[in-house]
Image (cartoon, grey):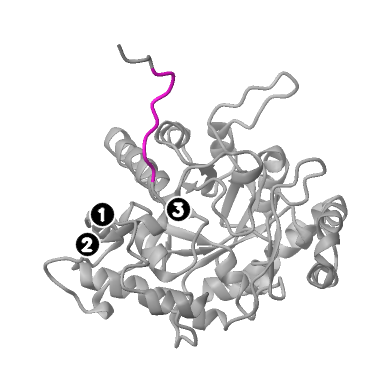
Amino acid sequence: MSNPRFKQLRRTYGFDEVAIVPGDVTINPDQIDIGFKIDNLAFAIPIIASAMDAVTDVNFAVRMSQVGGLAVLHLEGVQTRYDNPYEVLSAIAQAPQTEITALLQKIYAQPIKENLIGERIRAIKKGGTICAVSALPANTKNFAPLAAEAGADIFVVQSTVTTARHVSKSYRGLIFPELCQSVKIPIIVGNCVSYNTCLEIMRTGVSGILVGVGPGAACTTREVLGVGVPQITATIDCAAARDEYLRESGRYVPIITDGGFRKGGDLCKALVAGADAVMLGSIFAQAKEAPGLGYHWGMSHSHPALPRGTRIKVGSTGTLEQILFGPTSVTDGSQNLVGAIRTAMGVCGVSTIQEIHQVEMIVAPTIITEGKSWQISQSA
């Protein structure tokens, strides 16, 4: 007689465990449309820079928009706590590893200056570019109207884990339908990793969903809390929710896979898994224009009691243009990301992001090691 089971576990997959199957027809990469939309806002490339202090400042946001992508400015970071944030960023970059957690906790304890919210947004808009900003749910009620009034085009409500329903005895939580009604700009919400949660959030009227819990290079949530789902599985599940919501409502809400990317192939796999766009942190932190000065740190690092991020040294490997469009100066796939997407779509015989969602993907745990003994030995 078999023993009864308490839980049934299912197998899940990350980027390194799957591969894309090429198509029966190939297409020239220059004939491929890789654009995507958030409501009526159109973007030439499906790549977003994350709302992290080491990645996005005013200048980086302007440049990302100019090249066809989007960058999100964090309204609770150093850009809105300090009149001269670059002195603070320099101090973070120069701090010894043994002192960095305490320093970040001190830096992020400084109160947010609401006047700087408008100043930073107007500076981005002055460049004639699309402006996206981010805040935690707790501050969204206050900051979203300020951001919209200052001219922001997109507001991102972002936390480690987001749900459509929140239980609290101490306060009335953020109600997404009310937010969407009161703030007349697209609202993106994140992060989530499951079908049911993604579908519930879409039903509140938001304009986009961020997918991913804990995969980022500078995030330690998976180690500290044990929470997360590998990105391929999370993206597939949330893409299924997006398609179900489209069937029931007639409204298409894009999903954006957020975090865990190291190279162009990972971006391509996320798109095949169902993502409409991707959000990158550590890869962009390596850009010479990034404000982190060669370092990257998780935004949960500053938590006063349970920090869930770490500062990592990523270096400065190339310009933003090199990372996005080449010419590449490295062979690890971390540059010319747009070229990688176009080439992968070309060999799969698809010409739009929606079409790449239909491409076959297989479980392939040896895809990055098969036949690569020389590469592995030389990188060890």
Relative to 210, say whether 60 is above or below: below
- Dot 2: few (<14), some (14–19), or many (≥20) neighbours within 10 Å? some
Q: Is residue 39 above or below residue 123?
A: above
How much space separates mark 2 and mark 3, taking CA atoms? 22 Å
Earlier in the chain: of badge 3 and badge 1, it is: 3
* Identity of the residue drawn at 44% across and 82% down: 331
In the visual, does 59 lie left or right of 194?
right
Task: Name the residue: 60% across, 26% down.
Answer: 166
Q: Is residue 20 above or below residue 179?
A: below
Look at the image and give the residue range highlighted in magenta. Answer: 5-12
Viewer-proximal residue among 161 and 202: 161
Give the residue type at disc 3: Ile
Which quadrant does the N terminus fall into?
A: top left
Distance from the alpha carbon under mark 2 to that under mark 1:
7 Å
The residue carrying pointer 3 sits among few (fewer than 14), some (14 to 19) or many (20 or more) residues within 10 Å by Cα, namely: many
Q: Earlier in the sequence, mark 2 or mark 1?
A: 2
User: Residue 37: percent from the left, percent from the top?
Assistant: 40, 58
Q: Is residue 100 left or right of residue 340?
A: right
Q: Quadrant of residue 157?
A: top right
Camera-side mark, 2 or 3: 2
In the image, which disc is placed on residue 362? 1
Circle 2 sits on which residue? 21
160 left or right, relative to 363 = right
